[in-house]
Image (cartoon, rainbow, N blue to C red):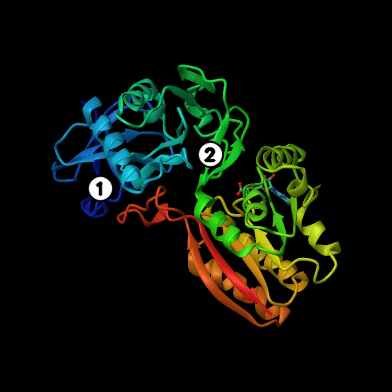
Amino acid sequence: MKEIRLKKGKESSLERFHPWIFSGALESTSPALSEGDIVKVLAHDGKVLGYGDWQIGSIAVRMLAFGECYPDFQHFMNLINDAWMMRKALKLKNHLNDTFRLIHGEGDFLPGLIVDIYGPTAVVQAHSAGMHLRRMDIARALVAVQGLGVENVFYKSETTLPFKANLNPRDGYIIGEYSGSVAIENGLKFNIDWLKGQKTGFFIDQRDNRLRLSNYSSGRTVLNMFCYTGGFSVYALKGGAKEVVSVDSSAKAISLTEENVRLNFDQTIATRHQSVTEDAFKYLETLPQGKFDCIVLDPPAFAKHRDAVPNALRGYQKLNAAAMRKIAPHSFLFTFSCSQAVSKEQFRLAVFSAAASVGRRVRILHQLTQPADHPVNIYHPEGEYLKGLVLYIE
Ligand code: SAH
């Protein structure tokens, strides 16, 4: 069994079940470790702390199991079953909803693995070499879970694995094949492009927040910035919005949004929707004041790393100030950050600075986060990445 030994004192975070070992904590390693090897993790004094996936990078080991128990196939099967038991308890699979996240990496004790369920299809994404190497085992485990109903497994890791590891993942079905591509979320339909879409094809993490928008949309004019597949726009129309405008800089995103509007509504409702292919900042600059009384700002992560945080905070401030300047009185602003490196407090401070610079009366109505199928492992606070505020602006 290949091993790694930690420097003195570096075992304490593992004793508190934090699942990452940074390369700087390593005292020594077995010779000729390959990326994706399972290693036995030893404290400086030789005590066995657990087992994890080895990889070259600042996170050197992602822990799979703590203590003496080796993570065999049954271990992964048990964790996948546990994840399903939890989603079952959350009642996420029902006649109105067949779309949910089954495995949320560290949040389901499976670092480096994401699995999203779209009806009979599971989309598997590996973020570590180890998960890439065991993808067939994971796929077989998913099909074997009683009651989950997975028949096809699509593997989508071309953009999520370190290219230097030479793993050369190919996106495509690894079990079965499915000709359908429509996901159902809260009774609404969305066309999912597994092959080319961002993430696993859809932003499942905004499900609860989209529903909240729907509840507040009746009679409103809604601007959905950074619309991607038009999730918020479809929910706003469903909630009775008078008018919805979707904006995205990508023409492909705009065509996905239009397709999803058509998929859910007849002509009378669909005509309330318009879309614009444009940069969000430019669009807000020329927007007449008071046209919208509900705005959604759900940009891509402005900070992918810690070094980018100061710039990202300036970006959030600028974007929120631009929207606050133009929004009508007595309006809702739904504003989000999905940057893991930006904390809840930092994001709120950026939004506060935006409000202060615009000088309007602003109140926080809701503080939003990711839904329950994106759980945060309490020992891994880094897993909390989505934050949002619903503001009332006068
Ligand atoms: N709100 C979406 C997810 C947003 S993903 C949902 O609920 O599914 C981020 C989107 O922002 C992408 O579609 C990307 O094309 C778009 N985008 C990135 N930079 C942009 C910019 N400067 N202006 C407008 N759209 C942008």
Instruction: Work out how far the residue at label 1 is from the one at label 2, CA to CA, in angstroms.
Output: 49 Å
Q: Position of residue 46 (x, y in %)?
A: 14, 41
Q: Are marks 1 and 2 in contact (CB under 8 Å)?
A: no
Image x and y of residue 95, in percent = 45, 39
Of tags 1 and 2, which is closer to the observer? 2
Circle 2 residue: 184
Quarter location, residue 334: bottom right
Amino acid at pointer 2 = Ile
Is any atom of residue 266 visible in this view? Answer: yes
Q: Which structural element holds mark 2?
A: strand
Among numbered discs 1 and 2, the one appearing first in the sequence: 1
Identified at 59% across, 33% down, the residue is 192
Q: Which mark is residue 7?
A: 1
Q: Nearer the viewer, residue 223 or 89?
A: 89
Neighbourhood count class around disc 1 (C-alpha, 10 Å): few under 14, some 14–19, many 20 upward:
some
When the figure is inspected, residue 184 is found, relative to residue 179, above or below; the finding is below
Q: Mark 1 belongs to which amino acid? A: Lys
**Whether the residue under disc 1 has CB within 8 Å of ligand 1:** no
- Mark 2, residues whose alpha carbon is within 10 Å: few (<14), some, or many (≥20)? many
Q: Any atom of ligand 1 within 8 Å of the CB at mark 2?
A: no
Return the mark for residue 59.
Answer: none
| Disc 1 secondary structure class | loop
**Residue at figure coordinates x 60%, y 72% from the top left:** 391
Judge by depth and name the residue closer to the eye, 78 or 213: 213
Closest to the observer, 198 or 52: 198
Where residue 392 appears, x then y in whole percent?
62, 75
Tell me if 139 is positioned left or right of 65 in this view.
right
